[in-house]
Amino acid sequence: MSLPSPPLKPRDNQTSSWLYVLLPLLSSVSMAAYMISAGRTWLMVLGILFVFLSVGVTVYVRTQMRRQNGRNMRRQRDRYLEYLGELRKQARESAATQREVSAFLYPSPRRLWALVIGRRRIWERRPSDPDFLRVRLGLGRGEPALRLDLARRSDPMSEYEAESEWAAEDLMKDCSTVSLQPAWVDLANVGVLSLLGPPDRGGNLLGLLLMQVAVLHAPDDVRLVVLLSDPESMLSWAKWLPH
């Protein structure tokens, strides 16, 4: 999913904006100077007042223009941040659903035991299934199902509103991965899988792999051969498997 680019900062062209405001002022000053040069007192007073009035109007117009630009920028920023908030909510819901699906496809040791006790989904994976002999090694961070990309303008001179750009980048960073995703290995295609590490941790992981194979795959499809140097080792329970 592509995020729209953040709102652009308004380009404040000082020269053109001041010329736009000052040109009427110069015309007013010229008229006031003509009135003062007439030599009559009431025209001179009126000309001076006219100059002050023109300056005040010029400053007021310039101030209103800057305030209007600021209001427009804040309005665009608030709408963009509100849109990002909705996307963050969607991304979190998608990540939660992805975790539930992953936990169902690659059950944890506790859930495997529940499957055995409840006799549900036993030996459900067949050789024609894409997840046949895929076993879970652990948990990590994975690719999200809902991927977010920030679309940027091709113009290198574009300058984005700082808070909006930061919020968009923060959203993409937070949603770049999904936690609690299973790390699995395909035993059907891996050839030889070696587990290196302390014997107790390696034995526990090997037992988990055997349990997944035994619970999710039928004896008609998978045969297990377990060689133990000690008949009383932690994997001695494998001899009771129908595989």
Image (tube, grey):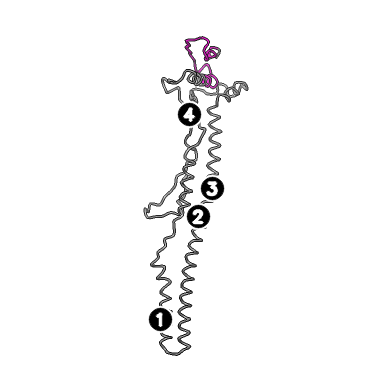
Sooner in the amino-acid sequence: mark 4 or mark 1? 1
Q: How many marks?
A: 4
Contact flag, marks 4 and 1 (Cβ < 8 Å):
no
Q: Nearer the viewer, mark 1 or mark 2?
A: 1
The image position of residue 141, as x and y in percent, is 48, 34
The residue identified by callout 2 is 77
**Closer to the N terminus: mark 4 or mark 2?**
2
Camera-nearest label, 1 or 3: 1
Hey, which residue is sitting farthest right in the picture? 118
- The span picked out in magenta is 210-239
Point out residue 156 in the picture as x, y percentages from the top left corner: 36, 53
Q: Choose the circle earlier in sequence order: 3 or 4.
A: 3
- The vertical placement of 82 against 180, above or below, is below
Q: Nearer the viewer, residue 127 or 84?
A: 84
Report, in whole angstroms, how far the alpha carbon at label 1 lies from the one at label 3.
55 Å
Report the disc number at residue 85.
Answer: 3
Q: Is residue 84 above or below residue 217?
A: below
**Residue denoted by label 1:** 30
| Front residue (pair 216, 170) | 170
